[in-house]
Amino acid sequence: MTDADAAKPVPVAVIGCGYWGRNLVRNFAELGALAAICDPDQATASQLSARYGAPVMALDPVLRDPAIAGVAIAAPAAQHATLATAALEAGKHVFVEKPLALTVPEAERLCGLAAERGRLLMVGHLLQYHPAFIALRELVRDGALGRLQYLYSNRLNLGKVRREEDILWSFAPHDLSMILSMVGQEPVDVAATGGYYLHKTIADVTTTHLTFPGGEQAHVFVSWLHPFKEQRLIVIGDRAMAVFDDGQPWSEKLVLYPHRIEWRETMPVPRRADANPVPLTEGEPLNLECRHFLACVASGTRPRTDGAEGLRVLRVLARASQSLTPSSAPVQGEAPSPVPSGVKIHPSAFIDEPCEIGAGTRIWHFVHILPHTRIGRDCSLGQNVMVGPDVTIGDGCKIQNNVSIYKGVTLEDGVFCGPSCVFTNVNNPRAEIERKDEFRPTLVKRGATIGANATIVCGHTIGEYAFIAAGAVVTGEVPAFALMAGVPARRIGWMSAAGERLGADLVCPRSGRRYREAGPDCIEEIA
């Protein structure tokens, strides 16, 4: 099912009908899905009700009404977590405007609650539904820009000045969402600087710098003290460059520049090429976003900007906020350090602050978590595991006994690390020579398995659902689904996402899912 052909519109109530909420009211009404309007300002609610023909209802009746399948929340950001929790507990599908919540633990609880109740949780990262960004993301994924090198965005305007959140939390989520979507992973380093001109504790201008495991870098510049409006995202690859400028007419919103840098006698020489506007199908991003929500509810499809995506953006916002704010001041996006709900930590474990541990995670005997480490939900860390500093571990990872995960290593969701497997972070260590500035990043992608006593030499990527046999030594890049064994490791076959070795027919004997060759030394699952 596509976003455009959801059959009968799903009944949706809009909660919060102020500056932005009234746009949601208009779009859901135009799509024939507006079931109710809920706002404490009765005059505003009544005016919208008369215009769009939907009843005004209080929150409790909305949540109790079985005919209302979903809610769209556009209340002040401080109320997002509370309202979304109430809606999910009432069995509603939830579309909540950015940010998903104001703290990482709140967002984690929302994601867990949505999964527990079997309901969709979608975050209003609007620009992911903009036709120009969708086309840009396809260019990136198709390799038209080559390897990504640098991304930067400017989101500038005069106002709207807020007091409940600073410019970072008001403007930057859109750009962070787009950048994370294109790069495909979270940054290993986040640093922000800001200016405080109208209020001594609320930033009016911020610049956030991001460094990613693959070497990509990005910055996000946002301000509500700017003489004119600018909404521009620029993406630099080693084969071409692209500019998404939302202030331009549709014919020029997305432009591809096939500029290249050539090397001649060890000198870089720029080679300019003519700009190529990318043809787009015009469409209002908010309308497309609302259609997407309705289609996902109708079909049970995972939203493009689901709760997990909102949580990733929130984690980056929290890290930027921590960097921006002096340590003595309260930090937006962070909560005190009590153990999150459902986390089990053995008394012999040591947890250095600050760090983040997702709900449902189990930390066993003599584990040491170093500062600035982020561990996702429902992970298991066995005896004598050491993690950090500055390490990111995704949801649902299992790390067996006696494993050390050093700075520079990133584990995506669902990674299995067998007992005593080893990650290096420097290729040529010497006890007498300091080489902490030479750490090379290692990325282990979703669902990969690393067997007992295997060694992963730093600076490489382990592809999705790859399987590293016990005792293997990985010294290069590992394709997705590859079965690797030996010293040095070489591919001896293919493994399915279910962990079964594939035969010549490339059909998983456990799940029945089929795979196909997608290129030299490359397979992919058939959708």
Image (spheres, grey):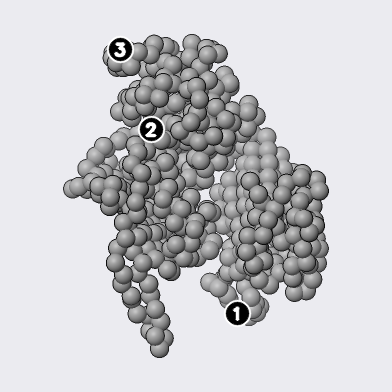
Q: What's the CA distance linking mark 3 and mark 2?
A: 21 Å
Q: Amino acid at mark 2?
A: Asn
The image shows residue 221 at horizontal and vertical percentages of 33, 53
Q: Mark 3 Cα within 10 Å, few/some/many (few <14, many 20+)?
A: few
The vertical placement of 227 against 475, above or below, is above
- Residue 155 visible in the current orientation: yes
- Looking at the image, which residue is at 38% across and 13% down? 54
Residue 401: name its quadrant. Answer: bottom right
Residue 324 is marked as none
Dot 3 corresponds to which residue?
A: 50
User: What amino acid is found at the position of numbered circle 3 in the picture?
Assistant: Ala
State the separation of the CA atoms marked 3 and 1: 74 Å
- Contact? badges 3 and 1 (CB < 8 Å): no
> 369 and 165: which one is in front?
165
Residue placed at 77% from the left, 50% from the top? 508
Helix, strand or loop for disc 1? loop
Residue 287's label in the rendered image is 2
Disc 1 residue type (three-letter): Ile
- Whether residue 10 appears in this view of the structure is no
Q: Quadrant of the N terminus?
A: top right
Task: Please tell me whether mark 3 sits on a helix, a strand or a loop.
Answer: helix
Position of 194 with respect to 9 (left or right) is left
Q: Is residue 372 left or right of residue 243?
A: right
Q: Secondary structure at mark 2?
A: helix
Can you give x and y, in whole percent of width and height, for residue 26 in the image? 34, 24
Question: Where is residue 521 shown, x and y percent of the image?
Answer: 67, 66
| Residue underneath mark 1 | 433
Q: Going by the image, does 372 lie left or right of 233?
A: right
Upstream in the sequence, badge 3 or badge 1? 3
Earlier in the chain: of badge 3 and badge 2, it is 3
Residue 141 or residue 461, whichever sits in front: 141
